């Protein structure tokens, strides 16, 4: 493979410095790339090992080009590496072949830790569901519903047979929760040390460090948007519409943009509208929407609240203002000037 890399590097140096477009098909061990010139003619097709050294040898020797690759396991780190080499990188959704982000400079430390944390959260959810399902199959229930505090003590009061069966499972859940807390602390330290502006976004109850940090690093530059409301569309939280005569049915959200950040914003909206959410304009608006939304009103209200939350976070980031939870409600209740 070393010979292939050297040959590819020599060929890439012979390519003229015109604007090139490169398609990169990523694989676990090997990847293939195709270089097309401005006239649409294929200039080079080659294989390269999917590791940092080989990719840097090949693409570091090429003139600044537009490189398109699809979303996958390797796309985050490879897209950042190619951007650092000076290329214009397009990461596309293979299902829709739409642009997701041309200049997304995620922090490698956060990226690695949030991915690992997300894996632990999924594992914990599966373990908790297994424990609850087992208890229900015996006609019994575990005490408490907070997954963060799930431990062997929650099995007290259950039948001896069920306690023995659940003890290792609950101990495992407790251990995973402790590991998640450790990741939370690392992410908190990263935010305080390198991204103090997250404090502006965390003014909103329901927005923690993980949401604030992921939001800032995904959008990268708040001034790339002319209006705060544009962020909702960018993150795929805007519902589509299909006009046909007098009918304007509301369609599902586009789900374009970063899926992880969109998931976090939905979780934030769930907290805001949930039993522990504080009274604020956003909560009042979402609850009113849920009440008149019919059968799927609550689900639509959560997504709509997530969209408004994304807009509000952008406004706070750009303006640097202090967040007033009931700003709109207080303005509406003020008497008009004489």
Image (cartoon, rainbow, N blue to C red):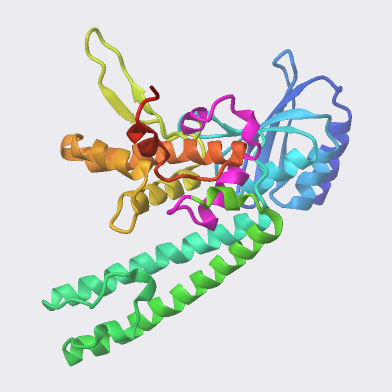
- The residue located at (38%, 47%) in the rendering is 269
Residue 190 visible at all: yes
| Looking at the image, residue 314 lies above or below residue 123 | above
Q: Quadrant of residue 58?
A: top right
Residue 272 shown left or right of residue 227 in the figure:
left
Residue 309 shown left or right of residue 216 in the figure:
left
Residue 73 visible at all: no
Out of 237 and 175, give the one closest to the viewer: 237
User: Residue 194 lies in magenta, yes or no?
Assistant: no
Q: Position of residue 251 (x, y in %)?
A: 30, 27
Residue at the bottom extreme of this rendering: 160
Residue 303 shown left or right of residue 293 in the figure:
right
Q: Main secondary structure of the magenta part?
A: helix
Q: Position of residue 114 (x, y in %)?
A: 55, 58
Out of 336 and 1, give the one closest to the viewer: 336
| Looking at the image, residue 135 lies above or below residue 25 | below
Out of 149 and 7, give the one closest to the viewer: 149
Q: Which residues are magenta?
A: 204-233
- The residue located at (32%, 85%) in the rendering is 152
Out of 22 and 11, give the one closest to the viewer: 22
User: Residue 223 lies in magenta, yes or no?
Assistant: yes
Residue at the top extreme of this rendering: 245
Q: Quadrant of residue 44?
A: top right
Residue at the front extreme of this rendering: 338
Q: Quadrant of the C terminus?
A: top left
| Looking at the image, residue 99 lies above or below residue 298 | above
Count of residue discs: 0
Residue 53 shown left or right of residue 222 in the figure:
right
Q: Position of residue 33 (x, y in %)?
A: 69, 35
Q: Position of residue 331 (x, y in %)?
A: 39, 34
């Amino acid at each position: 493979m070393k010979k292939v890399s050297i040959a590819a590097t020599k060929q890439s140096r012979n390519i003229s410095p015109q604007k090139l477009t490169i398609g990169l098909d990523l694989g676990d061990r090997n990847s293939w790339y195709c270089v097309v010139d401005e006239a649409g003619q294929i200039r080079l097709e080659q294989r390269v090992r999917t590791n940092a050294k080989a990719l840097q040898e090949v693409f570091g020797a090429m003139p600044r080009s537009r490189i398109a690759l699809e979303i996958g396991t390797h796309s985050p780190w490879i897209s950042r590496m190619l951007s650092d080499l000076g290329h214009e990188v397009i990461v596309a959704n293979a299902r829709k072949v739409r642009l997701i982000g041309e200049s997304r400079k995620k922090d490698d430390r956060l990226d690695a830790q949030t991915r690992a944390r997300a894996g632990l959260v999924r594992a914990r959810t599966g373990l908790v569901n297994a424990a609850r399902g087992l208890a229900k199959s015996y006609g019994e229930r575990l005490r408490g519903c907070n997954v963060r505090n799930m431990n062997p003590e929650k099995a007290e009061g259950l039948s001896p047979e069920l306690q023995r069966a659940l003890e290792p499972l609950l101990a495992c859940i407790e251990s995973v929760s402790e590991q998640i807390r450790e990741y939370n602390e690392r992410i908190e330290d990263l935010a305080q040390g390198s991204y103090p502006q997250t404090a502006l976004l965390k003014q909103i109850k329901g927005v923690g460090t993980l949401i604030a940090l992921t939001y800032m690093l995904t959008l990268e530059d708040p001034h790339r948007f002319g209006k705060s409301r544009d962020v909702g569309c960018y993150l795929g939280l805007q519902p589509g519409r299909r006009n046909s005569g007098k009918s304007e049915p509301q369609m599902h959200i586009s789900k374009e943009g970063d899926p992880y950040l969109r998931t976090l914003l939905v979780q934030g909206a769930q907290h805001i509208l949930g039993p522990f959410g504080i009274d604020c304009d956003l909560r009042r608006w979402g609850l009113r929407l849920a009440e008149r939304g019919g059968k799927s009103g609550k689900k639509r209200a959560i997504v709509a609240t997530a969209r408004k939350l994304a807009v509000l976070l952008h406004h706070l980031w750009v303006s640097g203002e202090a967040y007033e939870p009931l700003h709109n409600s207080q303005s509406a209740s003020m008497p008009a000037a004489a």
